[in-house]
Image (spheres, rainbow, N blue to C red):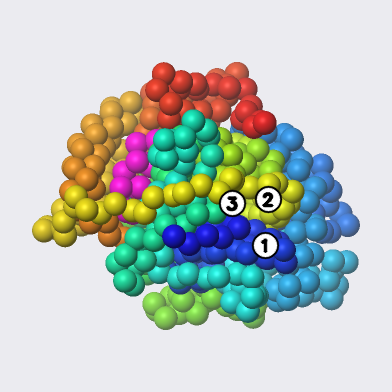
Amino acid sequence: MQRTDVLIIGSGLAALTTALHLAQTCQVTLLTKKTLQDSASAWAQGGIAAVLADDDSIEAHIRDTLTAGAGLCNEATVRFVVENGRAAVQWLVAMGVPFTADASSASGFHLTREGGHSARRIIHATDATGRAVQKTLCEQIRSHTNITLLEQHIAIDLITGDKLGLDDRICYGAYVLDNVTGTVKTFAARHTVLATGGAGKVYLYTTNPDVATGDGIAMGWRAGCRVANMEFMQFHPTCLYHPHAKSFLITEAVRGEGGLLKLPDGSRFMTAHDPRGELAPRDIVARAIDFEMKKRGLDCVYLDISHKPADFIIEHFPTIFDRCRALGIDITREPIPVVPAMHFTGGGLVTDLAARTDLQHLYAVGEVACTGLHGANRLASNSLLECLVFGRAAATHILASAGAPRVEVPEWDASRVTDADEQIVLAHNWDELRRFMWDYVGIVRTNKRLARAARRIRLLTEEIDEYYQNFRVSNDLIELRNLVLTADLIVRSAQLRRESRGLHFSRDYPDMLPVTGNTVLNPRPGRVCPGACDLPTLK
């Protein structure tokens, strides 16, 4: 048994922000299943959207976010996040994040523009913003005396009143597998924060790191928390297409700085799909690329910024330049082959403006949560902003709360399980799941495809549950169990939405309904309630 004031599960920007805001007065334990630097946040290239320029405004950023969200954003949430954007960026500057400077700008920093934005408001560190932010905050985390960092630890499940035989709706901590020793540890906490990121690895092609396996969403669901809008899985339009390039994103900022999408013959195609061309929101650009590839039988399309001066390209996109050059592609002279890939989980655990979930003393921050900010489609570079604002909001609420009562938590019981005899079962199921999710629940969906995916998920769930009941837990088993559950939530949500909106496009329902709501799933039997006008505000 290990006790702590606050248990934070995850190591991306949301987790680090929450931890650093708490650590002045609390003992914080931060768990990460690989190393501290392994997170989707560290892979973020583009930047952070915030109103920093004199010719920009809070209202313009709100309007752009609402437009991208296609009618499903919670306006109160959008305003809350946007209004706190400048303070969030200033906090990072004070922490020492080396954002790209621009002496000619009133803000002192270079601001770029990305798809869906009406102004230049993306502050960045060249084309490796996430890496710069994570490196700076990780140094603070490692040196802080009130933060206990445990790497190579993966959470198995949350400890709730239900599991303890108590008649309450309280989270008391979590059971955690130490991947180094293979032992399961029990963590009791006054507050627990899920900051586990999204579920990109449920798809065959993704820009996400290997750790993005839907862990927090699955754990929260099993503990009794609602999830919302899981049908809205964002596919980034431009992932590098190359047999030796694994999940390498080509940032939105390339298009923001003038990059053009082209067919193999050099002709443009985006203006035929949307008058905004390459600066249309991501869902529109991803569907346009998918359409052109399938129509013409293409393996990829091309993103061309070679018409810009070479010095400009190298200065603004050094990471992309170096990575492409290592693969034999000179982006100052030739276009970049690109394809869409799963990028961001638009839904998640339902939270309020303090990041609270349906369980007392359980919080969810970052991509694992559904706050109402993104609606049916996330606006570019709003995700890191969300991590910052809600990380601070969660910390503020935790510091003002008493915390869960101290109870006796039983140790993990492994007395009735044995060592696994066939690991190949996990590898086969993992591969099967990711392939049929890509084929049946991808950028364009149909009722038949979703039904096929649902049948396969049921079979996999039965196999994995049996495996889980009989064999000792492992990192692969935990992740696969979470991925299959998350896939089920995605498919169930997609089947409930009988229209096309934002990131969800169905050939059977190609039109957008005049009135709609959020898709909210409830793990309590008989209480599945799609169609609420707004995400409920928790009390």
Q: Is residue 457 left or right of residue 351?
A: left
* Amino acid type shown at disc 2: Ile
Q: Is residue 486 magenta?
A: yes
Give the amino acid type for the residue marked by disc 3 in the picture.
Answer: Arg
Name the residue carrying label 3: 190
Q: Quadrant of the C terminus?
A: top right
Image: 475 above or below 444: below
* Circle 3/circle 2 CB separation < 8 Å: no
Residue 451: percent from left, percent from top: 28, 28
| Whole-percent x, y for residue 117 in the image | 70, 49
Question: Does dot 1 land on a helix, a strand or a loop?
Answer: loop
| Distance in Å between CA atoms under marks 1 and 3 | 11 Å
SS at mark 2?
helix
Which residue is labeled 1 in the image?
A: 26
Write down the quadrant of residue 448 in the picture.
top left
Circle nearer the N terminus (3, 2): 3
Please state which amino acid type lies under the numbered disc 1. Answer: Cys
| 107 relative position to 487: left or right | right
Q: Nearer the viewer, residue 152 or 53?
A: 152
Look at the image and tell me in which quarter the N terminus lies: bottom left
Q: Nearer the viewer, mark 3 or mark 2?
A: 3
Q: Is residue 31 above or below residue 396?
A: below
Range of magenta residues = 477-490
Spatial separation of the CA atoms under disc 1 and disc 2: 10 Å
Instruction: Find disc 2 in the rendering and name its residue.
Output: 398
Bin the neighbour count of mark 3 within 10 Å (Cα to Cα): few under 14, some 14-19, many 20 and up. Answer: many
Residue visible at 80% across and 57% down in the picture: 86
Q: Answer left or right for 154 relative to 375.
A: left
